[in-house]
Amino acid sequence: MSLGSSSSAIHIQTASNGATTSPTRTIQKVTIHPVALFSILDHFLRRKDTQDRVIGCLLGTRTETEIEVHSCFAALHGELSNSSEFWLEDNYINSMYELHHKVHPKEVIVGWYSTGSTLDTYSALVHDHFEKSKTAPHPAVHVALNTGTEEGSKPGIAAYLSSPVGVSRKEPNCIFVPVPCEFQYNDAERSGVDLLVNSLSAGTSITNSASNLEVLESSIQTVMEMLDRVLAYVRSVIAGETKGDPSIGRYLLDTFSISTEGLDQGSFASTLQDTLMVSYLANLVRAQAEVSSRLQLVSA
Amino acid sequence: MATSMAAALAASIASAPSAHTAQAAAQPTYEPIPASMSKVIDIEAKIPLTCVQLDGLVVSKIVKHASSAPSFALGYLIGIDLDGVLEISNCFALPNVSDDDDTSSKSIAQYQKGMLAALKEVEPGDGIIVGFYQSNTLGAFYKQSLLDLQSIHRERLRHGGVVVVHDFTQASRGNAAFRAFRLTKQFHAEYRSGKFTTQSLMKNQLTFSSILEEIPVRVRTNPLLGAFLSTLTTPSSTTPASSFSPAAPSAALAPTFSSLDLAPQHMTSNLSNVLDALDEFKAEEGSLAYQMRNIVRDRNRANEHLLRRKEENALRVSQGLAPLPEEDIARLFKIQPEPSRLKSMLLLGQIDAYSQSLGSAASEGYVKMYSANAGNASA
């Protein structure tokens, strides 16, 4: 799933630059896992009153063309409101990274994040610092998360790589080149996000953990709603009320013609028997366990 | 620890309507409460826990750790208790213990200290460990290690500490299941005595179902995260990307149907888990019965000996001789103490948990099969 708007920028990088000696290929995609995203938001929520934005360190894995951000941690930084002073606690990042490395040895520092979508001189300096001392020889990625708390700005994420600019190479001189940024999750992470989304729709921001059957019920409901929608559409096309879209028609044909041979009556009955048997066994074992534990109490 | 806890409480008390704390609430700057007073002021510890509240961040962190950890994931929960609700606002993972115990436990202690200090630097305010989280597969959380961990930390943690259990296999099937438990008082008393004999179990009415008591869990999403999530889940309008704003989402969170997967993924491993646990339980019961038989035999022999000695003594007394001592019997026949039934009890709990998850998987299976069949018939 893509997070940032698709930009029209062309990604060009000079290969013959003395500063980038490593033969790394250009990063083409940045993916972010929910944990990193939520941590950044939490960090932003807990910022000090004097801070306008928060800065932290991104951890993850990288391949030649892709950076995967698995998690992140907050960094200590401060800046004056008139942008005359800026500091970033480097020792803290190093010790935090060491701690993190003990639990997740595969994850390395891949870049840094900040909230708000402004890129200024300090962004360039911080980026340069990360690129030189943390992620060298690989390029660092900068993820700017717009929290949407300022008026007129939409919440969203953008990822940038830096590219040197100018005749003489100086730290504050660089272009932030946008990179496509996607939100990624595995099945387990997805169900965690679902849980949070459900807790949102409950209104009070609070829910109990649902049972498996409830989750199943809700997804069957969703499927039924989708079927109803499709049915209504097909009926209206047949009745001539709306003009049919051939691509939708072809898609529907593909979807509904999926073979269901495996579910013919014979295998259905046998699978049903298996499931019944398993369920019977499970209940029997539970009952036995309960009886056994009670008997231990009464037998002297 | 005491002063920091008191300071944290001073912050929490501000919202609690109490005549005693009105003065403290009126002061905008919180002065450190003296250690002698902290016990008196700690009213929160007296309110019984009714609920555990997980922050959205904690949910995602636990899920991530559980899915990336090689075996089972273990970590600390950080939070604060307020008005009977244990609010867990953050957590951190513990490194996997694989090396020899002595060095690793030391390094874990160091790690924990460093992590807590580091978190406190960024997020001042809360920062006391209130419990643990642990991931498991197919509902197997009755483990000796878990109970040991809980019992050791029971005195140190507030409300005796809670453990949040996350079932990873359920999460990968589409249901992120979190349950919170804590040790019951009976079990803790029994654990401290360390006996677990039939008599003491009977006295405390302790079965596997009364080792842990479940506390309801709720999930809280903070408003900022909620706003962000709702922008992710709202389908974006089909405006072209021409309006260039550097940070506007263009796609929504697509719905997932992983829970509708017809294949019973974990049925076989679940079944074999049940059978393994049953086997183990039978072996344990066998060895318990063997030990009990030995004890009974020894006791009978000792009793016989005692009877004989008594008869002999009666004879000696009638003959006017000094009676032989009867105390050395216990020394002669060393009667083994009754074996601990903790392990067998835990195994029973394990069996129960496994078969429960098996049962629920089977019941889900029906629903899926019938719905698939219905779809098939109508197609």
Image (spheres, coloured by chain):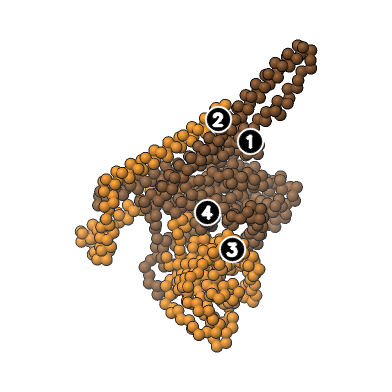
* CB contact under 8 Å: marks 1 and 4: no
**Amino acid type of disc 2?**
Leu
What residue did someone put label 3 on?
A: A101
**Amino acid type of disc 3?**
His
* Helix, strand or loop for disc 4: loop
The colour assigned to chain B within the rendered structure: brown
**Amino acid type of disc 4?**
Ser
The total number of labels drawn is 4
Q: Is residue A95 visible?
A: yes
Callouts 4 and 3 in the same chain: no
What residue did someone put label 2 on?
A: A297
Q: Position of residue B356 (x, y in %)?
A: 45, 42
* CB contact under 8 Å: marks 4 and 2: no
Measured Cα–Cα span from mark 4 to mark 3: 17 Å
Pointer 4 indicates a residue of which chain? B
Q: Which mark is residue B195?
A: 1
**Amino acid type of disc 1?**
Lys
The quarter of the image holding the C terminus of chain A is top right
Callouts 4 and 2 in the same chain: no
Q: Is residue B202 above or below residue A220?
A: above
Measured Cα–Cα span from mark 2 to mark 1: 15 Å
Chain given the colour orange = A
